[in-house]
Image: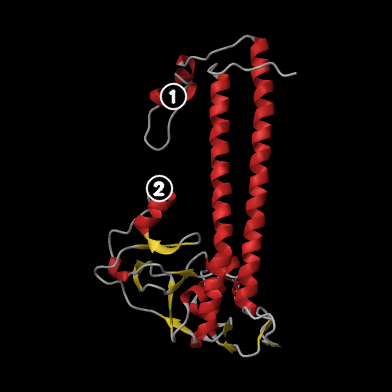
C-alpha cells in the first residue's frame, strides 16, 4: 500500500484533513539500501529532466500557435480580407487605420442594454473567459467540478438571449463574452443586445481583441477601485462596422484559417497531459520497486 493511501485511510475530516503525529508514526515506509536509493534518485533526476524538457518544448509550440492565431484574427478583423483596399485613419487610437468604407460608431449606437429580469424557465448561466456564456451544467462538465448554484431569488437575475454579449467581472482582462445559450445570469453583469443585424462571430473576435481590451481598461479606474465594468465604460470605446457581408466573410475566413491551429494546439495539450501522467507513473514505479532501475553510466 502506498504511503499516500495509508495516510488517506487514517485521516479524519471532511474538507480539511487532520494529520497527527500518531498517524505519521503508524504508517510504514520502505527503505532500500543506500546505494539503491542513490541509483533510483539519479535515474529519476535524468528521466524527469528529459520529460520536463519535452513538456517545455511543447508548451513553447502552443504559445507560438496562439500568437499565430492572434495575428490572423487581429489582421482580418481590423483590416479585412482585401490587401489592396484603400485605408483611412479611423481617428480612434485603439483602432488605427481601417478600410475607408468601414463605419466608426459609438458603441451605444450599435449595442444597448438588455434589462429584462430572468424568465421562469431560464437555466442558470456561467460567464467564462474560456467558453463564453454557457449553461452552468455544461461548464461543470467541461471543467470537471461543481459550481455554486443560486437557489433563491432567481427572479432578480438578468435574462440573456442567444448571441447577446455579457460584460462580466473579468471583462477588463479578457474582453466581452458571447452568450451561447438562453438563460439567466447574475444581476451585476451587463447584458448587451445588438440594435441592428450583425455577424455575432465577427464581433466575438472584435470584442476580445487585446487592443480593444486595453481601450476598455483606459476608460476608468475600475481596476484600482475594485469596480466592475459598466455600460458607461463600454460606451466610451468606439467600434468599427464593416458591411454585414464582409463581417460574414471575415468570420468564416478566421474559422478556416485557425481550425488547423486549434487542432495542433489540442494535440500538443494531449501530449503534455500524457507526458505528465508518464512522469507520475515512472516516479511511482521507480520508488516502489515495480521497475528495475538501471545503473547510469
Q: Name the residue under label 1.
A: 5
Disc 1/disc 2 C-alpha distance (Å) = 23 Å
Residue 204, visible in the rendered structure:
yes
> Does residue 244 lie above or below 297 as drawn?
below
Q: In which quarter of the image is residue 57?
A: top right
Q: Quadrant of the C terminus?
A: top right
Q: Which mark is residue 145?
A: 2
Q: Which residue occupies 37% across, 72% down?
A: 162
Q: Residue 252 carries which label?
A: none
Q: Which badge, 1 or 2, comes first in the chain's sequence?
A: 1
Q: Nearer the viewer, residue 137 or 229?
A: 137
**Residue 240 in the image, given as x and y percentages of width and height:** 58, 84
Q: Classify mark 2: residues with Cα within 10 Å, few (<14), some (14-19) or many (20+).
A: few
Q: Which of 264 and 185 is in front in this view?
A: 264
**Residue 199 in the image, given as x and y percentages of width and height:** 48, 78
Q: Classify mark 1: residues with Cα within 10 Å, few (<14), some (14-19) or many (20+).
A: few
Q: Identify the secondary structure beneath mark 1.
A: helix
Residue 207, visible in the rendered structure:
no
In the picture as drawn, the residue positioned furthest to the left comes out as 120
Amino acid at each position: 500500500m502506498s504511503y499516500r493511501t495509508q495516510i488517506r485511510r487514517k485521516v479524519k475530516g471532511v474538507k480539511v484533513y487532520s494529520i497527527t503525529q500518531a498517524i505519521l508514526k503508524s504508517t510504514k515506509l520502505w527503505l532500500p539500501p543506500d546505494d539503491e536509493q542513490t541509483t533510483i534518485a539519479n535515474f529519476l533526476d535524468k528521466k524527469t529532466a528529459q520529460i520536463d524538457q519535452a513538456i517545455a518544448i511543447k508548451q513553447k509550440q502552443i504559445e507560438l500557435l496562439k500568437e499565430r492565431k492572434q495575428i490572423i484574427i487581429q489582421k482580418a478583423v481590423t483590416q479585412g480580407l482585401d490587401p489592396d483596399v484603400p485605408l483611412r485613419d479611423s481617428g480612434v487610437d485603439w483602432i488605427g487605420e481601417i478600410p475607408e468604407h468601414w463605419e466608426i460608431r459609438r458603441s451605444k449606437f450599435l449595442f444597448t442594454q438588455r434589462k429584462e429580469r430572468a424568465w421562469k424557465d431560464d437555466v442558470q448561466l456561467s460567464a467564462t473567459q474560456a467558453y463564453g456564456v454557457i449553461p452552468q451544467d455544461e461548464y461543470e462538465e467541461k471543467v470537471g467540478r461543481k459550481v455554486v448554484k443560486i437557489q433563491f431569488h432567481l427572479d432578480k437575475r438578468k435574462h440573456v438571449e442567444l448571441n447577446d454579449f455579457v460584460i462580466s467581472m473579468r471583462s477588463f482582462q479578457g474582453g466581452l463574452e458571447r452568450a451561447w445559450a438562453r438563460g439567466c445570469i447574475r444581476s451585476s453583469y451587463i447584458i448587451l443586445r445588438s440594435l441592428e443585424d450583425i455577424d455575432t462571430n465577427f464581433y466575438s473576435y472584435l470584442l476580445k481583441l487585446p487592443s480593444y481590451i486595453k481601450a476598455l481598461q483606459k476608460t476608468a479606474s475600475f481596476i484600482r477601485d475594485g469596480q466592475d465594468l459598466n455600460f458607461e465604460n463600454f460606451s466610451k470605446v468606439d467600434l468599427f462596422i464593416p458591411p454585414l457581408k464582409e463581417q460574414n466573410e471575415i468570420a468564416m475566413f478566421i474559422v478556416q484559417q485557425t481550425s488547423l491551429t486549434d487542432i495542433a494546439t489540442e494535440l500538443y495539450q494531449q501530449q503534455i497531459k500524457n507526458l505528465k501522467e508518464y512522469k507520475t507513473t515512472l516516479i511511482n514505479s521507480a520508488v516502489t520497486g515495480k521497475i528495475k532501475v538501471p545503473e547510469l553510466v
